[in-house]
Amino acid sequence: MLAVVPGKDAKNMAKTEKEKSGNSATPGLEATLRATADKLRGNRDVLMKAHEEESRTPAALHEALLRKLLSGELRVPTVLEKMSAAD
């Protein structure tokens, strides 16, 4: 679609619109690059989702253990107690 710009002739307007649309001398290459970029973005999204899911389990375990530690329900022996029990 051509935009009407005062003071420009039709030939210059067509050239300006072509430049704006991003048409290049090698449209096949541009399409290939766009498709490759989309594929890489898709792979990144899948990996990020997998990482989020993997980190949920340790986070839930951390929260459960922290609650038990703070309430006194779970007690972690001190280093000295461990050392004396090992003897």
Image: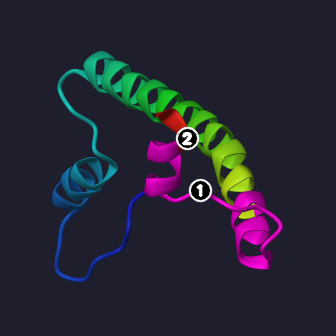
Q: Residue at x 21, y 58 (%)?
A: 16
Please give the residue where the numbered disc 2 appears in the rendered image.
85
* Contact check, label 2 and label 1, Cβ < 8 Å: yes
Q: Residue at x 72, y 59 (%)?
A: 65
Q: Hey, what amino acid is under mark 1?
A: Pro
Observer-nearest of 55 and 67: 67
Q: Residue at x 21, y 21 (%)?
A: 26
Residue at the farthest front position: 87
Observer-nearest of 38 and 32: 38
Alpha carbon distance from label 2 to label 1: 10 Å
| Horizontal side, residue 36 vs residue 7: left or right | right
Observer-nearest of 62 and 13: 62
Residue at the farthest bottom position: 6
Observer-nearest of 31 and 80: 80
In the picture, which quadrant includes the N terminus?
bottom left
| Horizontal side, residue 45 vs residue 59: left or right | left
69 is within the stretch colored magenta: yes
**Dot 2 alpha-carbon crowd within 10 angstroms: few under 14, some 14 to 19, many 20 or more:** few
Mark earlier in primary sequence (2, 1): 1
Vertical comparison of 35 with 82: above or below? above
Task: Check disc 1 and report its element: helix, strand or loop.
Answer: loop
Q: Residue at x 59, y 32 (%)?
A: 46
Task: Check disc 2 and report its element: helix, strand or loop.
Answer: helix
Image position, residue 7 (x, y; %): 17, 80
State the extent of the magenta-drawn residues as a range: 64-84
63 is within the stretch colored magenta: no
Q: How is colour applied across the structure in the image? A: rainbow
Q: Hey, what amino acid is under mark 2?
A: Ala
Image position, residue 44 (x, y; %): 47, 34
Vertical comparison of 76 with 85: above or below? below
Please give the residue where the numbered disc 1 appears in the rendered image.
77
Principal SS element in the magenta part? Answer: helix
